[in-house]
Image (cartoon, grey):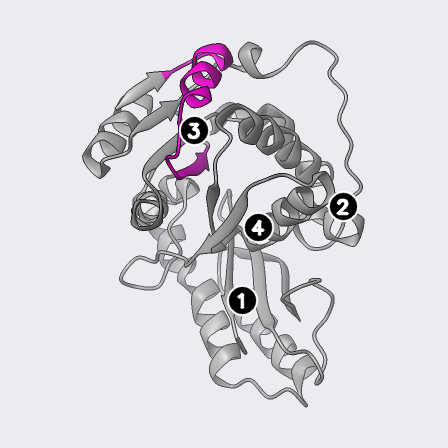
Amino acid sequence: MKIFTTKKETENYFANKGQKITGFVATMGALHQGHISLIKQAQQSTDEVTCSIFVNPTQFTDPKDLEKYPRPIAADIAMLEQAGCDVLFNPPVNEMYDDNEKWHLNLGDLEHLLEGKFRPGHYQGVTQVVYKLFNIVKPDFAFFGQKDYQQVLVVNKMIELLNMPVKLVMCPIERENDGLAMSSRNIHLTPFDRENALILSKALNWAKNNFDSNNIPAIQQQAQQMISSQPGVELEYLEIADGQTLHTATSETKNIVALVAARVGKTRLIDNMLFDW
């Protein structure tokens, strides 16, 4: 696996890619099997797979969250090598950002709903760094996890607005055997928290299994109640939404997704589930 830490050497490498179809997986490190599944999916449809590891400061709304974000780079490199990743781009912050850099993209409602409401400015930071990464790596395909469903919509919107020559592929959520969505943040869960966190996937499954397009508000309320009544869990939102716009789903909505965010102990977790697709 080739490892690059500067934009210049990475751009030089990809300037000579020839006819190779390239795939890209953007990460913030602390890799787990969810990330590896993205690499595996990329390997099936591209000739060469690049992964980036960059803890992006502009997408954190809480400085303490940025500070405590796990950075086990040696373990990450070992995982990538074992997975057969071809290239790693692992830049320092000053390689990606100049002082007083300005960025704003008009993302419409997507920026302010759900995650955007609880993490103002987050998606400006996401698009800022993903735009930079796409321009450096110049992938043909980019593979993003469904767990960050709203992020997938936002990045697709950016690709559309800026007319970027990359196709985004959304890959399914990888779950532990008990249903918990894999996340780099799971390492912060105590055993007590870990058990309580299962209510998120349980509530989503319940909503999916009991879904009735004529009774969406009642189903949403019941799923919210399931989470709110779990000890040690503070619900931020659970919404049954239109999969394209994230506005509240109605009986006419074709593609439905249920999305949830909650604090479990001191750790903030998100999850989602697709319904009618």
| Helix, strand or loop under label 4 | helix
Magenta part of the chain: 4-27
Q: Which residue is mark 1?
A: 227
- Mark 3 burial class by Cα count in 10 Å: few <14, some 14-19, many 20+: many
In this picture, residue 107 sits left or right of residue 267: right
Dot 2 and dot 3 residues touching (CB under 8 Å): no
| Helix, strand or loop under label 1 | helix
Q: Is residue 11 magenta?
A: yes
- Camera-near label (1 vs 4) is 4
Q: Which mark is residue 107?
A: 2
Q: Which residue is mark 4?
A: 152
Q: Quadrant of residue 255?
A: bottom right
Residue at (48% x, 25% y) in the render: 54
Q: Amino acid at mark 1?
A: Ile
With respect to residue 145, does 91 lie above or below?
above
Question: Closer to the N terminus: mark 3 or mark 1?
Answer: 3
Q: Which residue is mark 3?
A: 52
